[in-house]
Image (cartoon, helix red, strand yellow):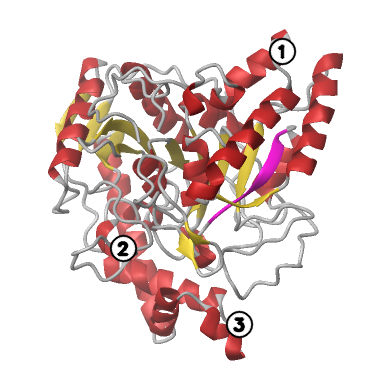
Amino acid sequence: MSTKHEGLDRLGEGPGGAPHSPAALSATELLAAYADGSLSPVEATDAVLARIEEKNGELNAFCQVHPDEARAAARASEERWRRGEPQGRLDGVPASIKDLMLVRGWPTLRGSATADPDQVAEEDSPAVARLRENGAVLVGKTTTPEIAWKGVTDSPLTGVTRNPWDPSTTPGGSSGGAAAAVATGMAPLATGTDGGGSVRIPASFTGIFALKPTWGLVPHFPASAFGSLAHSGPMTRTVADAALMLDVMARPDPRDWAALPSPQGSSFTEGLERPMNGLRIAYSPTLGGIEVHPEVARLVAEAVTAFEESGAHVEEADPPLGDCLDDFHVLWFSGAAKATESIDGPERRLIDPGLQEIIAEGLTYSANDYLTAMATRMAMGERMGRFHTDYDLLLTPTMPLPAFEAGREVPPGSTARRWTDWAGFSYPFNMTQQPAASVPCGFTTSGLPVGLQIVGPRHSDALVLAASRAFEEARPWGHIWP
């Protein structure tokens, strides 16, 4: 683990102590190097695969690695760049895929010991298809808890995934493998999914950037059993890389009947430099009463001053979300029951015990319970819509605590029953479908990352990205590595 530090002012270096290693470069840096001929996609892919070989045994970020396929794709990309004919916007950039998404020719195991390891997908999920169409080099699949049911990453199939800042701690979840991979240079781009915080929780715990876009902006296929709680989004080390990924992934797909149309006008990448001057920003340190670890509270409060310094008007204000935990559980636990309904007989005993518990609870809910929970969502959405007529953005901690012991659903000694009890800053914005990002904002005295959450009204993804970019420029973090 790195030397103890608190702020985002420590000069760091690239993975393995090599600041100029291709594995340490962002996607935008790689693309610039390909364009000027100073680096090839083959060199970048080899560096990433070497990094996976070096670190994955300790961290368990990848459950599948496909080196031969990745190198073949990199060689094809190298030839296109040599001809001056790159394919799309990500040609030759290594990327990882969360093992909930289909990748043509690869198995999709979803962290489940009940999955057939010999089955392979016949087609790509929408986000994967868009990455492939734009030339990304797919290196492998990242670990997830079984069907992504909880906010940490361990499963009966793949075991425990660990945090690169301190391997005794969790990277969070459910996109914990993706976060650990990005944080250590095992590929600059990663796809994640987020049904209750699953890109933001691990981004906060591992010190990377992640965006949960407005629901429907990134199409889904197959449809999630968790319905419209489930979002897909980019996980990267820089905001520019996430905007680039979103430009690629935010395209309609005929297999998702609820997908939004492509954003009109300029791209997310082109809109990153929007000034913060004059924005009205609400800062909610506890979201109405969540208990926050003192170091997290201090670091987030210090981070908020960066927006005041940039000319935004910031004031403390709690959004009128109300208590939605029970309603979220109705939707989440019912979704877990639906996702596993085809597993029967002795195989059901292979399911994660915690998942079995929420499945059992999910089966007790009625259609009226489900519709009542949906009515809560609609009321929350209406209240948040009104809130955002007064405030352009909302700032909160991403998580109320730093990473805790790996292999546990709740922190040791906690009275929490489920992961949702310590994730109160994240799942409400799945209920409301709003875009929400986590940006690194500092480190505890024990060297664990802390995240700042930036939330916008629905369809304000470009503004959330621009605000994240403004913070990144004011408090740089990209030079700091585990």
Q: Image quadrant for the N terminus?
A: top left
Disc 2 is placed on an element classified as helix
Which SS type dominates the magenta stretch?
strand
Work out whether mark 1 precedes mark 3 in sequence or the reverse, and give the earlier one: 1
Instruction: Return the mark for residue 420.
Output: 2
Occupied quadrant, residue 300 = top left
Q: Image quadrant for the C terminus?
A: top left
Q: CA distance from mark 2 to mark 1?
A: 45 Å
Q: Look at the picture and state if 312 lies above or below 350.
A: above
Disc 3 is placed on an element classified as loop
Relative image position of residue 7 (x, y in whole percent): 24, 25
Q: Residue at x 83, y 19 (%)?
A: 85
Q: Amino acid at mark 2?
A: Thr
Left or right position of 416 against 481:
left
Magenta span covers which residues? 136-143
Can I make out residue 295 in this image?
A: yes
Left or right position of 428 against 179:
left
Can I make out residue 246 in this image?
A: no
- Along the viewing direction, whichever of 147 and 58 lies nearer the viewer: 58
Disc 1 is placed on an element classified as helix
Q: Look at the picture and state if 475 lies above or below 342.
A: above
Relative image position of residue 421 (x, y in whole percent): 26, 63
Instruction: Return the mark for residue 35.
Output: 1
Work out whether mark 2 precedes mark 3 in sequence or the reverse, and give the earlier one: 3
Q: CA distance from mark 2 to mark 3?
A: 25 Å
Based on the picture, tell me whether residue 128 belongs to the magenta stretch. Answer: no
Residue occupied by mark 3: 343
Q: Residue at x 60, y 82 (%)?
A: 343
Marks 3 and 2: in contact by CB < 8 Å?
A: no
